[in-house]
Amino acid sequence: MLTHADEQGRPKMVDIGDKAVTRRRARARTRVVFPPLVAAKLRETGAMTKKGPVFNTAIVAGVMAAKKTHELIPFCHPLGLSNCRVTVTFGDADDVIIDCLAAIEHKTGVEMEALTGATVAALTVYDMCKALSHEIVIEQTRLMGKTGGKRDFGDVEMPA
């Protein structure tokens, strides 16, 4: 049975009242792929466009979004994150890799916060670079790892 549906299949918020408070962490990653000339231009300028510093703006946007996940995704509990860290780095090819780590001591996990942070950071990169090309692709948004709930998964450590 889905956790966000009652016995009649109607949507509902999950009751976390009986869950134990634990330290919970989640890391999500998104990849933004650019046409080769755009990637070269971004590397050349240190990711600066006419709109400003792309990476720094994306970091701020990602953290802001993670903190507002409950306002965007139905049935996400409002959470006061104890940590949220977003990194934006050039990848090995014509891409940028965005990681978002969210952490809290709570009764529910922070996977959606990490995914939202990474996704909005990627959308911000797109917005700040779209004047250079509309062939920018946001892809591979995925949960890299989570800890502290019923079962741990993957890797929550942020890349160096």
Image (spheres, rainbow, N blue to C red):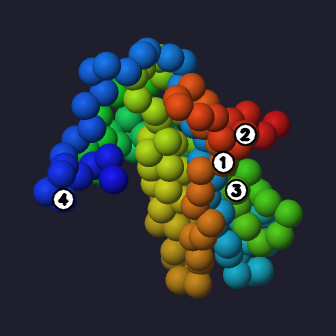
* x and y percentages locating residue 101 in the rendered image: 59, 36
Residue at 38%, 35% (x, y): give it.
67
Provide the residue designation for mark 3: 97
The reply to whether dot 4 and dot 3 touch (C-beta < 8 Å) is no
Question: Residues under labels 2 and 1: Cα distance?
Answer: 6 Å
Disc marking residue 9: 4
The reply to whether dot 3 and dot 2 touch (C-beta < 8 Å) is no
Kind of residue sitting beneath label 1? Met
Q: Mark 2: few, some, or many residues within 10 Å (few <14, many ≥20)?
A: some
Q: Earlier in the sequence, mark 3 or mark 2?
A: 3
* x and y percentages locating residue 47 in the rendered image: 68, 57
Question: Residues under labels 2 and 4: Cα distance?
Answer: 34 Å
Question: Residues under labels 3 and 2: Cα distance?
Answer: 16 Å
Of the pair 124 and 19, the residue shown nearer to us:
19
Q: Mark 3: few, some, or many residues within 10 Å (few <14, many ≥20)?
A: some
Disc marking residue 144: 1
* Quarter that holds the C terminus: top right
Question: Residues under labels 3 and 1: Cα distance?
Answer: 13 Å
Question: Residues under labels 1 and 4: Cα distance?
Answer: 30 Å
145 on left or right of 129 = right
